[in-house]
Amino acid sequence: MAEGTRVVVGISGSLANLAALHRAVEEALLRDAVLVPVIAWTPVGGEPAYRAHPCPQLAELWARAAHDRLDAAFEQAFGGYPAGLRVTPMVLRADAGRALVAVADRPDDLLVVGAGRRGRLPRILRPSVTRHCQAHAVCTVVTVPPSELLKDLRRADWNADALALVAA
């Protein structure tokens, strides 16, 4: 393995994110690199709200939930952590974009992030992790769109909802 070669991937726990996880595993295997899956979390209400009313027990629960989401992503995508691949998972209490850029801090790293479709309101309420990474990373950033199957499932779900409204 090349010394220090890493593939860093952002994990969100969403179905759309599974395509990015699959791509990151493929890249890590091709490059004989360490896979570094990163899941970032912040307290409900944000850090300012937590500082105003700290609760270490809740913070521990949120951190444990993040660990569980990371494990669940690998379980959903591969039935567990892939054999024959060095994996160094990281759970960080931070904003996702900043956390990913901080971890993928070497020029020879590869940063893999999902590039989902977002409407106007979600973009206003929550800045794009993908755009943050593209603007601030010192390494190559690969953006992975959701799989076509997920798009078909969303379309089928939308059509089912529309038919239910018409039938009502």
Image (spheres, grey):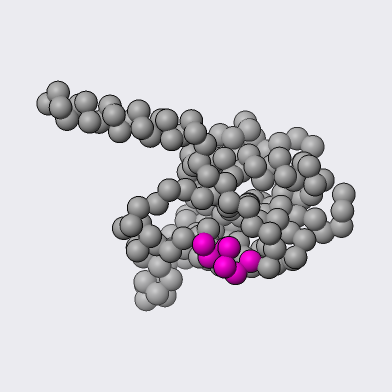
Taking the image as drawn, is residue 28 in sight? yes
Give the residue displayed 28% in from the left and 27% down from the top.
160
- In the image shown, does 9 or 60 lie closer to the viewer? 9
Report which quarter residue 38 is drawn in. Answer: bottom right
Range covered by the magenta-colored residues? 131-137
The x and y percentages for residue 138 are 68, 68
The x and y percentages for residue 97 are 54, 63
- In the image shown, does 69 or 24 lie closer to the viewer? 24
Give the residue displayed 43% in from the left and 64% down from the top.
127
Question: Is-magenta flag for residue 132?
Answer: yes
Query: Of all residues shown, which one is farthest toward the top?
Result: 167
Give the residue displayed 82% in from the left and 45% down from the top.
32
The x and y percentages for residue 41 are 50, 59
- In the image shown, does 164 or 120 lie closer to the viewer? 120
The x and y percentages for residue 136 are 60, 69
Question: Is-magenta flag for residue 3?
Answer: no
